[in-house]
Image: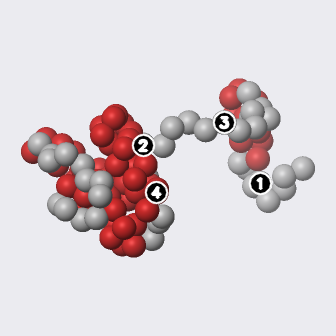
Amino acid sequence: MKFVAPLTDAERLTLLEARDQGPTAALRRRAQAVELSSRGYRRTAIADLLHVHGETVSGWLDRWDTQGVRGLYDHPRGGRPPRFTPAEAEQVRLEVEPSPRQLR
Protein backbone atom coordinates (compact mmCIF):
# COMPACT_ATOMS: atom_id res chain seq x y z
CA MET A 1 0.00 0.00 0.00
CA LYS A 2 1.20 3.46 -0.84
CA PHE A 3 0.18 6.51 1.17
CA VAL A 4 1.59 10.00 1.37
CA ALA A 5 3.25 11.15 4.56
CA PRO A 6 1.02 13.04 7.01
CA LEU A 7 0.39 16.55 5.72
CA THR A 8 1.24 19.73 7.52
CA ASP A 9 -1.50 22.35 7.86
CA ALA A 10 0.14 24.43 5.11
CA GLU A 11 0.34 21.45 2.75
CA ARG A 12 -3.29 20.52 3.42
CA LEU A 13 -4.40 24.11 2.77
CA THR A 14 -2.37 24.24 -0.45
CA LEU A 15 -3.84 20.95 -1.66
CA LEU A 16 -7.39 21.98 -0.86
CA GLU A 17 -6.90 25.25 -2.71
CA ALA A 18 -5.39 23.44 -5.71
CA ARG A 19 -8.24 20.91 -5.63
CA ASP A 20 -10.93 23.59 -5.58
CA GLN A 21 -9.37 26.40 -7.62
CA GLY A 22 -6.52 24.90 -9.63
CA PRO A 23 -6.06 26.26 -13.15
CA THR A 24 -6.50 22.88 -14.87
CA ALA A 25 -8.71 19.87 -14.32
CA ALA A 26 -5.63 17.64 -14.23
CA LEU A 27 -4.12 19.59 -11.33
CA ARG A 28 -7.42 19.53 -9.43
CA ARG A 29 -7.71 15.76 -9.90
CA ARG A 30 -4.11 15.12 -8.78
CA ALA A 31 -4.49 17.33 -5.72
CA GLN A 32 -7.66 15.46 -4.80
CA ALA A 33 -5.82 12.14 -5.12
CA VAL A 34 -3.05 13.27 -2.78
CA GLU A 35 -5.56 14.64 -0.29
CA LEU A 36 -7.54 11.39 -0.32
CA SER A 37 -4.35 9.40 0.18
CA SER A 38 -3.47 11.52 3.19
CA ARG A 39 -6.86 10.65 4.65
CA GLY A 40 -6.09 6.92 4.36
CA TYR A 41 -7.76 5.98 1.07
CA ARG A 42 -5.99 3.18 -0.76
CA ARG A 43 -4.49 3.73 -4.18
CA THR A 44 -7.03 1.42 -5.85
CA ALA A 45 -9.95 3.20 -4.19
CA ILE A 46 -8.64 6.57 -5.37
CA ALA A 47 -8.20 5.18 -8.88
CA ASP A 48 -11.80 3.94 -8.88
CA LEU A 49 -13.13 7.27 -7.61
CA LEU A 50 -11.20 9.30 -10.19
CA HIS A 51 -11.63 6.80 -13.06
CA VAL A 52 -7.91 6.36 -13.69
CA HIS A 53 -5.48 3.45 -13.48
CA GLY A 54 -3.88 2.61 -10.13
CA GLU A 55 -0.39 3.13 -11.59
CA THR A 56 -1.41 6.65 -12.58
CA VAL A 57 -2.33 7.42 -8.98
CA SER A 58 0.93 5.86 -7.85
CA GLY A 59 2.87 8.19 -10.15
CA TRP A 60 1.00 11.22 -8.79
CA LEU A 61 1.80 10.22 -5.22
CA ASP A 62 5.46 9.66 -6.09
CA ARG A 63 5.67 13.09 -7.71
CA TRP A 64 4.03 14.65 -4.63
CA ASP A 65 6.60 12.95 -2.38
CA THR A 66 9.58 14.10 -4.43
CA GLN A 67 8.49 17.51 -5.77
CA GLY A 68 5.56 18.65 -3.66
CA VAL A 69 2.81 20.64 -5.32
CA ARG A 70 5.07 21.44 -8.30
CA GLY A 71 5.00 17.75 -9.16
CA LEU A 72 1.24 17.87 -9.67
CA TYR A 73 1.42 20.40 -12.52
CA ASP A 74 1.83 19.31 -16.15
CA HIS A 75 5.32 19.70 -17.53
CA PRO A 76 5.88 21.21 -20.99
CA ARG A 77 5.60 18.67 -23.76
CA GLY A 78 7.36 18.45 -27.06
CA GLY A 79 5.52 18.91 -30.29
CA ARG A 80 5.60 20.45 -33.69
CA PRO A 81 7.14 23.92 -33.73
CA PRO A 82 4.69 26.75 -34.40
CA ARG A 83 4.12 27.70 -38.02
CA PHE A 84 4.32 31.41 -37.33
CA THR A 85 6.53 33.60 -35.21
CA PRO A 86 4.62 35.56 -32.54
CA ALA A 87 4.71 38.67 -34.77
CA GLU A 88 3.36 36.72 -37.76
CA ALA A 89 0.63 35.15 -35.61
CA GLU A 90 -0.47 38.60 -34.45
CA GLN A 91 -0.56 39.81 -38.07
CA VAL A 92 -2.74 36.83 -39.06
CA ARG A 93 -5.06 37.50 -36.13
CA LEU A 94 -5.44 41.16 -37.12
CA GLU A 95 -6.22 40.23 -40.72
CA VAL A 96 -8.76 37.56 -39.82
CA GLU A 97 -10.50 39.50 -37.05
CA PRO A 98 -12.68 41.76 -39.29
CA SER A 99 -14.23 38.79 -41.16
CA PRO A 100 -13.44 35.55 -39.35
CA ARG A 101 -15.38 33.37 -41.81
CA GLN A 102 -13.25 34.39 -44.79
CA LEU A 103 -9.95 32.68 -44.05
CA ARG A 104 -8.46 33.15 -47.52
Q: Quadrant of the N terminus?
A: bottom left
Q: Nearer the viewer, residue 101 or 27?
A: 27
Between discs 1 and 4, the one toward the N terminus: 4
Q: Position of residue 32 (x, y in %)?
A: 30, 59
Residue 73: numbered disc = 2
Circle 3: is it few (<14), some (14-19), or many (20+) Cα within 10 Å?
few
Looking at the picture, which amino acid does disc 1 mark? Ser
Which element is circle 4 on?
A: helix
The outermost residue toward the left is 9
Which element type, helix, strand or loop, lies under badge 2? loop
Q: Is residue 60 left or right of residue 93?
A: left
Are dots 1 and 2 in contact, CB under 8 Å?
no
Type of residue at label 4?
Glu
Nearest to the eye among marks 1 and 2: give it.
Answer: 2
The mark nearer the N terminus, 2 or 4, is: 4
In the picture, residue 76 is in which quadrant? top right
Amino acid type at mark 2: Tyr
Please, is residue 85 above or below residue 14 in the view? above
Is mark 3 in CB contact (under 8 Å) with mark 2?
no
For mark 3, what is the residue? Answer: 78
| Residue at the spot of label 4 | 55
Give the number of the disc on residue 99. 1
Q: How far apart are marks 3 and 4 (CA)?
A: 23 Å
Count of numbered labels shown in the rendering: 4
Q: What distance separates the C-alpha of mark 3 from that of mark 1?
A: 33 Å
Q: Nearer the viewer, residue 99 or 45?
A: 45
